[in-house]
Image (spheres, helix red, strand yellow):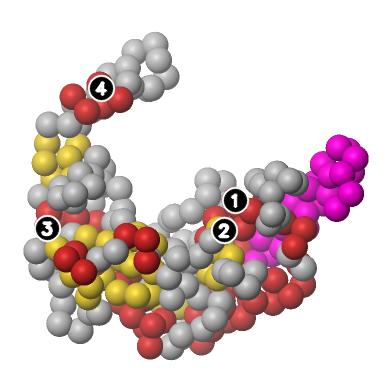
């Protein structure tokens, strides 16, 4: 658990026999007895990183991204999460220097006491997955998307990554934001790595079947194909719901 004001991170374990692992909020709070050292989670600010101080931070202006989840024994290096955060910063810096309209806009690192506690990005109204969940009566919905042009935008962003020697490795509907102009914006570079590196898994469960273990363009081609198939089916299902309810769309 992370304290929203101090960014201190705590961990603990609670036994929930007979409740399928569902602890109460009070039980979860009571078990938080171990403070995780900041250096295990938050890397020190480097001189060449774009930084926004916590004193100048206005929450509504950006979308903040947290470090990875802490699990005891997951990393041989206790600072493994901080190291992964550094890798994300470097990837986003490269994109910042080589921007593309279909890649999320990196705004900088949120700094507190000399450490990076969040990565900050331009905020978009929604993502593809959430848009598909919207009800017909809502103002914006999936039928506003034209599949071919939308997919062309995603492909353009992916191919720009490839031109920099990077693969996203985790393309799915949650990682496709939609901006104010209904343009697709690829986000979340947690798994984005240079070609040939061991792929870090991150994304929707069950979505990445067939992916190679190393970062490569082939993984993104699989992801693009799955997103297009999912989008076509989602639009068809959305229209079916409309017709079934007798709503003229």
Residue 39: assigned label: 3
Q: Label 4: which residue?
A: 26
Q: Which mark is residue 130?
A: 1
Q: Residue at x 66, y 47 (%)?
A: 134
Q: Is mark 1 in CB contact (under 8 Å) with mark 2? A: yes
Seen from the viewer's position, the closer of residues 199 and 175 is: 175
Spatial CA distance of label 1 from label 2 is 5 Å
Q: Which residue is mark 2?
A: 127
Q: Position of residue 63 (x, y in %)?
A: 39, 62
Give the quarter of the image for residue 92.
Answer: bottom left
2 and 4 marks in contact (CB < 8 Å): no
Structural distance between the alpha carbons of marks 1 and 4:
30 Å
The residue that appears at 59% across and 51% down in the rendered structure is: 130
Q: Please name which of the two marks, 3 or 2, marks the residue nearer to the observer.
A: 2
Tag 3 secondary structure: helix
Q: Residue at x 53, y 69 (%)?
A: 186
Instruction: Write down the region rendered in magenta.
Output: 224-249
**In terms of secondary structure, what is the magenta stretch mainly?**
helix
The x and y percentages for residue 197 are 38, 71
N-term mark: 4 or 3: 4
Give the mark nearest the N terminus, 2 or 4: 4
State how far apart marks 2 and 4 are (Cα).
32 Å
Which corner quadrant of the image does residue 190 belong to?
A: bottom left
Marks 1 and 4 close (CB-CB < 8 Å): no
Q: Residue 230 magenta-drawn?
A: yes
Q: Residues within 10 Å of mark 4 (few under 14, many from 20)?
A: few
In the picture, measured across the screen, residue 149 lies left or right of residue 115, that is right
Q: Is residue 221 visible?
A: no
Secondary structure beneath dot 1 equals helix
On residue 8, the disc is: none
The x, y position of residue 199, in whole percent, is 42, 63
């Amino acid at each position: 658990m992370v304290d929203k004001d101090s960014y201190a991170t705590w961990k603990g374990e609670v036994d929930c026999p007979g409740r399928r692992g569902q602890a109460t909020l009070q039980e979860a709070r009571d078990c938080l007895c171990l403070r995780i050292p900041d250096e295990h989670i938050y890397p020190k600010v480097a001189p060449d990183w774009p930084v926004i101080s916590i004193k100048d931070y206005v929450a509504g202006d950006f979308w903040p991204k947290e470090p990875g989840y802490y699990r005891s024994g997951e990393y041989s290096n206790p600072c493994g999460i901080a190291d992964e955060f550094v890798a994300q910063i470097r990837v986003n810096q490269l994109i910042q220097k080589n921007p593309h309209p279909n890649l999320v806009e990196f705004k900088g690192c949120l700094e507190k006491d000399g450490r990076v506690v969040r990565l900050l990005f331009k905020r978009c109204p929604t993502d593809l997955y959430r848009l598909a969940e919207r009800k017909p009566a809502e103002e914006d919905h999936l039928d506003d998307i034209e599949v071919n042009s939308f997919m062309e935008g995603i492909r353009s962003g992916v191919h720009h990554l490839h031109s920099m020697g990077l693969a996203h490795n985790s393309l799915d509907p949650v990682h496709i934001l939609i901006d104010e102009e209904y343009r697709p914006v690829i986000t979340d570079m947690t798994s984005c790595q240079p070609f040939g590196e061991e792929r870090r898994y991150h994304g929707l469960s069950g979505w990445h079947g067939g992916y190679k273990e190393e970062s490569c363009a082939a993984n993104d081609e699989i992801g693009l194909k799955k997103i297009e198939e999912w989008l076509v089916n989602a639009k068809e299902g959305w229209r079916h719901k409309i017709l079934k309810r007798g709503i003229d769309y």
